[in-house]
Amino acid sequence: MDMKIELKDVSKFYGRKQALDHVNLEIHKGMFGLLGRNGAGKTTLMKIITTLLGPSSGECTVCGVNVREAVKVRQMIGYLPQDFSMYGNMTAYEALDYLGLLSGIHKQGRKEIIPDLLEKVNLKSNLRTKVKAMSGGMRRRLGIAQAIMHNPKVIIVDEPTAGLDPEERMRFRNLLTEIAGERIVILSTHIVGDIEATCEQIAVMDQGRIIFKGTVSQLLEDAIGHIYEIKVSRIEVEELKKQYEVTNVFMQSSEAMVRFIIKDNDGGVGAAKMVQPNVEDAYMYLMHKNGGVK
Amino acid sequence: MMWITLFLKECKEIGRSITYYIFLACLSVFFVSQMGSVDAVSEPLPGAESYGWKYSEEEDVIMYSALDNLLFELGRNSFVTYPIGFYKQVILSENEQEEIYELLEDVVEQSKDDLTEAVKKYAGSMDHSAVESINIRPDMTYEEFCDVFNRIDKILGGGSKYSDERIYSHAIVSKTYEEAMDDYRSIIENDHVSGAYARLFADYMGIILAILPVFLAVTRVLKDRRAKAEQVIYSKGRSSAVIILTRYTAIIAMTLLPVIILSINPLLQTIYVAANNGITADYFAFIKIIFGWVLPTILFSVSMGFLLTELTNGLLAILLQAIFWIVSVFAANTIIVGYVGWNLVPRFNTVGSYEVFISIFNDLVKNRIFYTIISILMLFGSIILYDMKRRGRMHLDRALSKDIKSKS
C-alpha cells in the first residue's frame, strides 16, 4: 500500500469564502508539521483528510484511497481534534472502550489494548478518573490514546499543545514522537516550537495556500542572512519595530536585545549583527516575505 | 455482537443521565396519580341503588338534555367551550344572545318572548321547573335539531358541546341492571379483566409518552456536541446507521423498560380480580397493548426528536412535539373513550366498553401502523442527516465558516 497522503489541487469554499486555494501536497511516513496562523486553513485541510469535510474541487487520497470513500479512510485514520473531550461522566477506561467499539475493535482486543494505551500516555493511574475531572493535558493524552487505539496508518493531531503548560507540552511532543514509528503523523499547529521539536518535514499555510513545503533545514536556510540582532536602549525598541519586523525582544535591565528581519531590499542595518536564524525566525521571515506578518 | 455491546453501552449512558431520572419521575408520578388501583369486578346484584352511568343513544333524550343545558348556560350567559382543546368561558353580546333565541324559536313550541322569559326566570331562581314547560316541536327531526345546534356552536366560536360531534355528551343516563350485567360479562368473558385495564393503562401511558421521550432523544443527539466529542465520534469507522440505530433503540428500550415495570402492578391486580371471578386473566394483555398501542407513540416522539435535532442542532424538536402533543391530547376534547382518527394519542379512558374497542379496532390498527411508518421514515432521515454532517455537508460548513470569519 502507498504510504502517503496526496492532495492534488484541493480547494474548499464555505459559501463565497475560500478556505483552501489549490493545495498540492504530499505527506510521507514520519512526523509532518503543518504550520500556520489561526484561520490559515490548517483545520480545513485536516478535516478533508479525515473525511469530515469534502473538498470543493481537487482530489485527496489517503494511502491510495480517495477520501470520498469515507468508511475505508476512517479505518486508516486516528484523529485528535483541536478541542477533544468525551462524555464527562465516563472514566478514562470507559471513554476508550466506547471509542474503541466505534472503531470496530472487539471486546478482547479492547480489554488488552486499553491498559497498555493508558500506560503509554501516562494515564494508567487515572483508569477510573472521570473525563470531567481531567486536566486539559490529561484529556489530550486520552485523546492521543483513542487516536492510536485501532493502530491506524495515519494519525492527525490538530493544535494538540494549545493551552497546555510547558511541562505538559514537552510531554505531549515526546509522546507524539514515540508513537510516530512507521506511521504518517500530521501535526497541525500555530506554535513553532512544536514543529521544531518534532518534525522534519513541514508545510506552512497562509490564507488557504501552501507557502512553503520542505524540511525544517530548508526553512532555516531560506532565512539565513535575513535575521539580525542588535542591542538597543529600551526606548529605541519601538522605533525599531516601526522599521523592521521584530521576531524577538529580550529585555536586559535598561537595554534590550532585539532580533529582526531584514529583507533583500531593506537598507543598512547599522550596528546590527547577522545571526543564525532559529525556526521561529525562519517562520516569521517566510510569513513576512509572503505578504507580511499580521 | 458488537452492535449489542454498543446498544448496551448506550443504554448505560442513558441510565446515568439526569434527564432519564426526570423522565422516570414524571412517568411514575403520572402513572400513580392517574391509573389508581384496579377495582374489584363483581357481578351486579338486582335492586341496587345505582349501576353507574352511560351516554344515552336515544335521540329524544339527547335533544332534551342538550336543550336543557343550553337554556341553563343561556340564562347565565356563560358558556363552556374548548375551541383548541383548552377550556374557554364564552360570554355573548346582546345581539348574539338574540340570535340564539331566534334559532331556538324554530326548535321549541314556545314563542321567542315566552322562551326568553322562561330562561330569565330559570337563571334568576335556579328553579328547573321554570323551563320544564319548554317543549321541542313534535315535527323537529334529530338532524334538523343538530343543524340548529351546530349554528349555535358557531356563534359560540366552536368547541362547545352543542356541535353534532359532541352533542351526545349531554345525555348522561343511569345504566340498567341488564346493561350493568352486560358490562360485567364483557369484562369477564371478552377482556378477562386484564384487557379492560390494559386499555386504560395504554390510554394514560399514551398521553405521557407522546411527549416525554422527545426529551431523551434531543438530549442524546445534543450530547456529543455538548461534550465536545462530536468530531472524534464522526471520525470513527462505525457506519452512521449503526451509530444512530443503537442510540435510537437504546432510548426506545430504556423508555419501554419502566413502562413494562409499571404495568406489572395493575397486571397482578387484574390477575387477582380475575381469579376472584373464577377466570384466568390474560397474562400478556399489558405487554401486547404496550407494544401494539403505546410503542408507536414512543417511536414517533423519539424519531421527531432525532430528526429535528440532527437538522437544527437545537431544541426545536421539543417545541414542535409539545405543540403536536397538546393538539393530540386535547383534540379528543370530551370524547375520551374511543377517539382514534389520525390522532397521535388515541383515547380510551374507561374500564370495559369492549364493544367500543372492537368498533374502533381497525381504525386503531391503521393509526398505529401509520405512526410506525412515519417514525421509521423519520429515523432513516436522521441517519441520512447524521451521515451528511459526518461528511461536512451540513452545519459543519456553516460553523467553520463562522469560525474562520471570527478568526480572520
Image (spheres, rainbow, N blue to C red):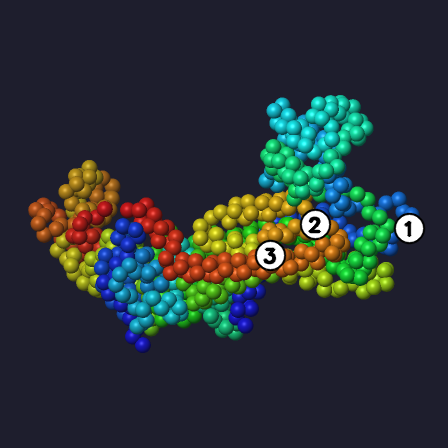
Q: Earlier in the sequence, mark 2 or mark 1?
A: 1
Q: Earlier in the sequence, mark 1 or mark 3?
A: 1
Residue A241 placement: quadrant: top left
Residue B367, numbered circle: 3
Which residue is drawn at the image coordinates 59% and 40% (left, top)? B84
Residue furthest to the bottom: A1
Pointers 2 and 1 in contact (C-beta within 8 Å): no
For the residue pair A96 and B380, the one nearer the viewer reads as B380
Location of residue B163 in the rendering, given as x and y in whole percent from the top left corner: 65, 40
Q: Is residue B375 left or right of residue A82?
A: right
Location of residue A226 in the rendering, given as x and y in whole percent from the top left corner: 14, 53
For the residue pair A156 and B343, the one nearer the viewer reads as B343
Which residue is drawn at the image coordinates 71% and 38% (left, top)? B140
Pointers 3 and 2 in contact (C-beta within 8 Å): no
Q: Is residue B192 left or right of residue B254?
A: right
Q: Is residue A270 left or right of residue A281?
A: left
Residue B21, numbered circle: none
For the residue pair A109 and A217, the one nearer the viewer reads as A109
Real-space CA distance between mark 1 and mark 3, rounded to the nearest whole angstrom: 41 Å
Location of residue B60 in the rendering, given as x and y in whole percent from the top left corner: 76, 41
Amino acid on which the number 3 mark rests in the picture: Asn
Q: Which chain is indicated by disc 3?
A: B
Query: Which residue position is annotated with label 2?
Result: B337
Q: Quadrant of the N terminus of chain A?
A: bottom left
Location of residue B82 in the rendering, given as x and y in whole percent from the top left corner: 63, 38
Q: Are marks 3 and 2 on the same chain?
A: yes
Which residue is drawn at the image coordinates 28% and 61% (left, top)? A33
Query: Which residue position is annotated with label 1?
Result: B46
SS at mark 1 in the image: loop
